[in-house]
Image (cartoon, rainbow, N blue to C red):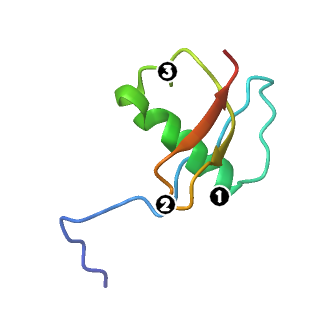
């Protein structure tokens, strides 16, 4: 028997699907970068650009460079 509560959350960020259409193994770092892209200006660029890579620029993790196809 399972108990289903009101709080159901995602266990991990969604997989990154690259523009070439090839499904690759799940990479936590890529998924985190894609999540960052969806957070920038409330997802404004997530619908028009594809995530390529990201890098944290400062030790406090407040500045991140996100690279997209545009």
Q: CA distance from mark 3 to mark 2?
A: 24 Å
Q: Residue at x 41, y 37 (%)?
A: 39
| Rendered-image quadrant of the C terminus | top right
Which dot, 3 or 2, sits closer to the camera?
2
Q: Earlier in the sequence, mark 3 or mark 2?
A: 3
Q: Secondary structure at mark 1?
A: helix
Q: Residue at x 65, y 58 (%)?
A: 28
Which dot, 1 or 3, sits closer to the camera?
3
Q: Is residue 57 above or below residue 8?
A: above
Q: Secondary structure at mark 3?
A: loop
Q: Is residue 27 left or right of residue 20?
A: left
Q: CA distance from mark 1 to mark 3?
A: 21 Å
Q: Is residue 7 above or below residue 57?
A: below
Disc 3 packing (10 Å; few <14; some 14–19; many ≥20) = some
Disc 1 packing (10 Å; few <14; some 14–19; many ≥20) = some
Out of 27 and 10, give the one closest to the viewer. 27
What mark, if any, has residue 60 been given in the picture?
Answer: 2
Residue designated by label 3: 45
Residue designated by label 1: 28
């Amino acid at each position: 028997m399972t108990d289903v509560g009101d709080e159901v959350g995602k266990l991990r960020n969604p997989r990154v699907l690259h523009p070439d259409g090839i499904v690759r193994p799940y990479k936590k770092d890529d998924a985190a970068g894609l999540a960052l892209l969806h957070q920038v200006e409330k997802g404004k660029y997530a619908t028009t650009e594809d995530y390529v890579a990201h890098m944290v620029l400062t030790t406090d993790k407040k500045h991140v460079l996100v690279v997209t196809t545009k």
